[in-house]
Every structure is written in structure tokens, then in C-alpha cells.
Image (cartoon, helix red, strand yellow):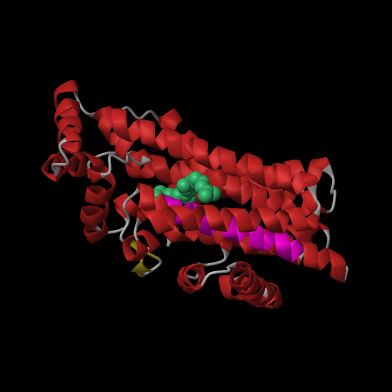
Amino acid sequence: MRLEAIYLLLKKDLDATETHITSILSTMSSTSFSKSVLEYVISMKGKMLRPILVFLSTRLLFPDLRDDEYSKLLDVVSAVEIIHMASLVHDDVIDEAKFRRGKISLNEKYGNDVAVTMGVYLYSISLKLIARTESVPCLSELSDTVKEMCEGEFLQYVGRQSLTYSMDDYFSIIYSKTAVLFKSACISGIRLFNGKDSDCEQLTQFALSLGEAYQLTDDYLDCFGSEKDLNKDVGQDIVQGQLTLPMIKVLESLDKKDQARVLEGIRQKDISCLSILKEKLHDSHIKDEVYGIISSKIDASKTALSRLPQNKYNEALASLADFVFSRISN
Ligand code: FPP
Ligand code: MG
């Protein structure tokens, strides 16, 4: 199934979600300033990947929902997307990002004070939506996930300060930063409608593997996408002290003297030290190694799907996994 076919399959659901989010965000704000900032947030529309995951995995197990069940699902799907929005608003403050989704970031446009407040504001709206469903299992799932996402940010912060990254740290960070929210998206339907634990376990496996593969492909493309991307992205990540898996691997392969030179360069924000990394990166098996790791994550996600009911929603989830892999294999 092509990506366009998935959007078509869920067109009504995704349209309903967008309308729901827009109406909630605009009715919940009470000052004209918060309204205008929220309008800006709404205008930075994303790919709706997490809502797609919520709908596909819920319909996989509960293809026919009553109207009252569908209203609850709309609240949960909106809460998941709003948590994602809040996390990006805060992440851009932390990363001092100037752009997000092709537009000026909220922090750059309105300043950090407004961006931090708006992130919490968005988060509070998502809590309200979950409260409306009266589903304690959903509340518990999403609060655990937000906590885990914050732990990931702390781990990333400590790594950036000390510049001591291990592969274990890297995998913990991508698990917390990306994979857990994929997991919440995929199991929120089960939590809401009290589905089976065994299905929950398989969807968890699917989502965590897919989420990790998704982040790994981003990091792979940053390094191996093209020479132009390489120059741009290696510089950006490292100036922030941010090391991705290919970079950690190449750093580990350097002798002690070169390692010390590169780490000092990163500390001084001197990107000339990157030439050592770039040279080694292309002169090694690291590209194949990372490709292999991504490929095995995609396989693991599909194995989990093979243990779930087989229908068009399952097929669509498998196609999403293929799509993630196609970003690096085409
Ligand atoms: C993007 O990472 C960051 C995330 C996916 C998660 C950020 C999480 C938090 C700030 C904690 C949770 C906070 C709330 C309010 C729910 P990136 O910088 O690698 O990606 P990017 O290139 O898209 O910025
Ligand atoms: Mg960022």
C-alpha cells in the first residue's frame, strides 16, 4: 500500500482530527494573545504520523466503533498529537532552533518565555482531553510517556555537556525521544477500549521498533544522505554537541589522539575538526552497519504485525514500516 493510499484510507479520520484540534485549541484560549500564538502553532502542520498510528492500530483491533467511542478516540488522538506539538515547541527552545517545519520556530518568533509557556499550555490541553475520556489507563500511559520523553531530554543534555556518548546512551535517547510516543500512539486504542494484553504487547513491539528505525533513518540520512547534507548536518549536530549513531561509531574507531582533537573541537565549537570524522565515516563499514541495524528494526516491527489480526489496517501499518525503510534504501 502506498503512503497516499494510507492517507486516503484515513482521510475522514485525519480531517476530523484536524478540525477537532483546531477547534479545541481555539476555544480553550481565553486571551487574544494566546489565541494568536496558538494560530501560529496550528499553522505549523506536521505529517500527522502519530494520529495515523492511533487510527490504524485502533481500527486493526476495533474496526467498528460506536459514535460515543469514536468521540473518545478523537480526544485521545488529538491529545497524542498535541503532546507531540508541545514537545517540539520545548525541543526548539532547548536546541535554540530557528526553524520548524519550514517556518520560523515559535521561540524565534515570540521568544523563549512565550515558547516555554505555550509548550506547557499545549500539554495542559492534552491532559484535559484525556480527562474527558475518563480513561485512567490512557492517562497512565500518556503520563508515563511524557515522563520518559523528559528523561530522554535529560540524558541528551548530560551527554552534550560531558561529550561522553556511548551506543547505549544513543539507543536510550532515541527510545525516549521518539519510540515511546509511537508506542503510546499504537496502544492508546487498546488502553481506551480495554483490549487484550497480548495484542498490546505485539503493538508495543511494532511501535518501538518502528520508532527507533524512524529516528535511526533520520540520523543515517544526516550523515549519508548526500555530500551537501553531510556538510550541513554534521556541522549542526556537532556544534550542539549532539552525536548520532554513525558519529559515535566513527569516534570510537579513532585513535586516542584524534579522539581528543575531535572532542576538543566540539567543545570549542570549531567545526574544522570534522574533516577527520567525515573522512573516516566514508572510509569505513559504518554505513553498512547502521543500514543493517535499521533493516533489523524494520524486520522486528513486521514480525510483531504478523502476530496480529490480518486486515487492511495491518497491511497499512506494514506499508508504513516499508516507507520508513524506503527513505534509506531507494
Ligand atoms: C526532537 O528531537 C525532540 C523530541 C522528539 C522530544 C522532545 C521532548 C521534550 C522536550 C520533553 C517532553 C515535553 C513535553 C512538553 C511533552 P530532535 O532535536 O532530535 O529533532 P528535530 O530535528 O526535529 O528538532
Ligand atoms: Mg531539535
Q: Which quadrant does the C terminus fall into? A: bottom left
Give the left or right position of residue 270, taking residue 177 as reference: left
* Residue 80 part of the magenta-drawn span: yes
Q: Which quadrant does the N terminus fall into? A: bottom right
Task: From the top left corner, tell me how far across and down residue 261 is, in percent.
Answer: 14, 30
- At 57% across and 62% down in the image, what residue appears? 49
Task: From the top left corner, tell me how far across and down residue 30 is, in percent.
Answer: 58, 69
Give the left or right position of residue 61, taking residue 275 as reference: right
Q: Nearer the viewer, residue 142 or 246?
A: 142
Q: Is residue 298 visible?
A: no
Residue at the extreme left of the image, as rendered = 272
Determine whether 190 is above or below 36 in the image: above
Q: Give the main secondary structure, helix, strand or loop, of the magenta stretch.
A: helix
Q: Quadrant of residue 249?
A: top left
Residue at the extreme front of the image, as rendered = 31
- At 53% across and 62% down in the image, what residue appears? 323
Residue at the extreme right of the image, as rendered = 66
Q: Which residues are magenta?
A: 73-90
* Residue 189 part of the magenta-drawn span: no
Task: From the top left corner, tell me how far across and down residue 140 is, in percent.
Answer: 72, 42
